[in-house]
Image (cartoon, rainbow, N blue to C red):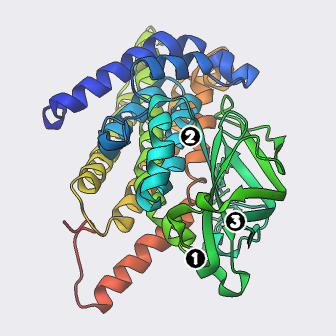
């Protein structure tokens, strides 16, 4: 389906593919084993100018939008799902500035993010506040030109490699979700500490940390958008833009696993012939490939709708995320099956795809939550007397 991609899309994809082939695939197993951050890859992405793909041109980025972001994430994730998210989380954490930041905040922070000089992380979740994000308890109180932050964040992807953090906290606990605000916190701010690193099942090269705030004084100009109480709205707008990126991570993993499965089953001999020559195996491969292509088309359609200025993208972004990530789990699991016993061993790269795929069904809103978003949209549209066949309204 390459004919639907623009010349620009193909260029981004080719650049990312080259980096994946040269810098990611050869070290993917080692990164998984050591759980080390892929600095070499990040430097290659910086050199290629890919760190600012999604950032508007007026702030030093390439203005490539969500579609080109997805293409880069897909290519990186085809080689390593951990590297894919290492990259994509910069988009997740910088989208709040793009959608809700003041002009000064955009000018101050986005150019360095676009160049990859600043790596970012996104802090919404807490120990007791996951799916119910509006119940967060981290606090920020305004005092003498500062916000004084107290509380803890859990599951911060890029936790210790980032230098700038979009942190969601309550500036008015009496207002619940409407009292949530986002604050931009720079690494090294006194009172801000990076805590425990999680020992993950998959995506092991990306550091996921707890964050702690103890009387952390952040200048009041770091309140995102300059107004309190808009944090939850900014978080939801961000997730609408970022979920196609998680879907693209899942797509890359599924495609990467499928490619390996085709290659392996063509080589593996049983009963005097390649296992790929058995119809039962071909049917499995056919179903895997069909699911992968369906996921791809849904993600690209969603990304194009977002870039085209569609207004109501929550349902479509949730559909792309839930479909592609469920596909990734099923395709990577089937790929392990096609490798037989060898699929269950670390001598072969395939089991890592299955471990990496699992998280895509969990973060940026679990797939149960995506289904809630889709279901609620359907009911809302029907109640408004406008049942729709697609959610992205131009
Ligand atoms: C590796 C990793 C990286 C992460 N990175 C980040 C990050 O960078 N920034 C960040 O802010 N967060 C991050 N997260 C957090 C992630 O987004 C949450 O784990 C996720 O939103 C789920 O929250 P929870 O773990 O508290 O599960 P819970 O909300 O406790 O859910 C437990 C189970 O109940 C289900 N459930 C909950 N509510 C409902 C409902 N209403 N209907 C049906 N089912 C429901 C869930 O789907 C899940 O199956 C990360 C998590 C992990 C594991």
Left or right: 43, with 10 as reference point: right
Element under disc 2: helix
Sequence-first disc among 1 and 2: 1
The residue where tag 2 is placed is 357
What residue sits 30% from the left and 20% below the top?
14
Q: Is residue 389 above or below residue 212?
A: below
Kindly identify which numbered label has been placed on residue 229.
1
Q: Please name which of the two marks, 1 or 2, marks the residue nearer to the observer.
A: 1
What residue sits 16% from the left and 34% below the top?
6
Q: Position of residue 237 (x, y in %)?
A: 44, 64
What residue sits 72% from the left and 65% below the top?
147
The residue where tag 3 is placed is 145
* CA distance for labels 2 and 3: 44 Å
What residue sits 18% from the left and 65% below the top?
394
In the displayed image of the protein, which residue is found farthest to the front? 144
Left or right: 248, with 203 as reference point: left
Left or right: 368, with 110 as reference point: right
Element under disc 3: loop
């Amino acid at each position: 389906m390459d004919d639907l991609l623009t010349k620009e899309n193909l260029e981004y994809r080719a650049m990312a593919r080259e980096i994946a082939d040269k810098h990611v695939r050869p070290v993917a197993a080692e990164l998984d084993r050591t759980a080390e951050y892929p600095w070499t890859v990040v430097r290659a992405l910086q050199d290629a100018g890919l760190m600012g793909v999604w950032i508007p041109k007026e702030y030093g980025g390439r203005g490539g939008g969500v579609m080109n972001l997805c293409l880069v994430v897909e290519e990186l994730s085809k080689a390593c799902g951990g590297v894919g998210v290492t990259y994509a989380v910069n988009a997740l954490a910088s989208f709040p500035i793009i959608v809700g930041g003041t002009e000064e905040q955009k000018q101050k922070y986005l150019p360095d993010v676009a160049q990859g000089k600043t790596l970012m992380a996104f802090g919404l979740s807490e120990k007791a506040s996951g799916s119910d994000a509006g119940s967060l308890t981290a606090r920020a109180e305004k005092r003498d030109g500062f916000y004084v932050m107290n509380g803890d964040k859990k599951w911060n992807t890029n936790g210790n490699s980032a230098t700038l953090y979009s942190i969601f906290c309550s500036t008015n606990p009496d207002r619940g979700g409407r009292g949530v605000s986002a604050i931009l916190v720079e690494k090294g701010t006194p009172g801000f500490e990076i805590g425990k690193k999680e020992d993950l099942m998959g995506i092991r090269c990306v550091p996921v940390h707890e964050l702690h705030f103890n009387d952390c004084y952040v200048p009041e100009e770091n309140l995102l958008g300059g107004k309190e109480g808009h944090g939850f709205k900014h978080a939801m707008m961000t997730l609408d833009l970022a979920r196609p990126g998680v879907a693209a991570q899942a797509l890359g993993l599924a495609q990467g696993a499928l490619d390996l499965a085709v290659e392996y089953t063509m080589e593996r001999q049983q009963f005097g012939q390649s296992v790929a020559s058995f119809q039962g195996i071909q049917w499995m491969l056919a179903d895997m490939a069909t699911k992968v292509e369906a996921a791809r088309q849904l993600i690209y359609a969603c990304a194009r709708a977002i870039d085209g200025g569609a207004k109501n993208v929550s349902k479509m972004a949730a559909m792309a995320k839930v479909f592609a990530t469920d596909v990734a789990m099923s395709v990577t699991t089937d790929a392990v099956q096609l490798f037989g016993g060898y699929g269950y061993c670390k001598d072969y790269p395939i089991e890592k795809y299955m471990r990496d795929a699992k998280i895509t069904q969990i973060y940026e809103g679990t797939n149960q939550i995506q289904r809630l978003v889709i279901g609620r949209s359907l009911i809302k549209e029907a109640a408004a007397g406008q049942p729709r066949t697609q959610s992205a309204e131009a």
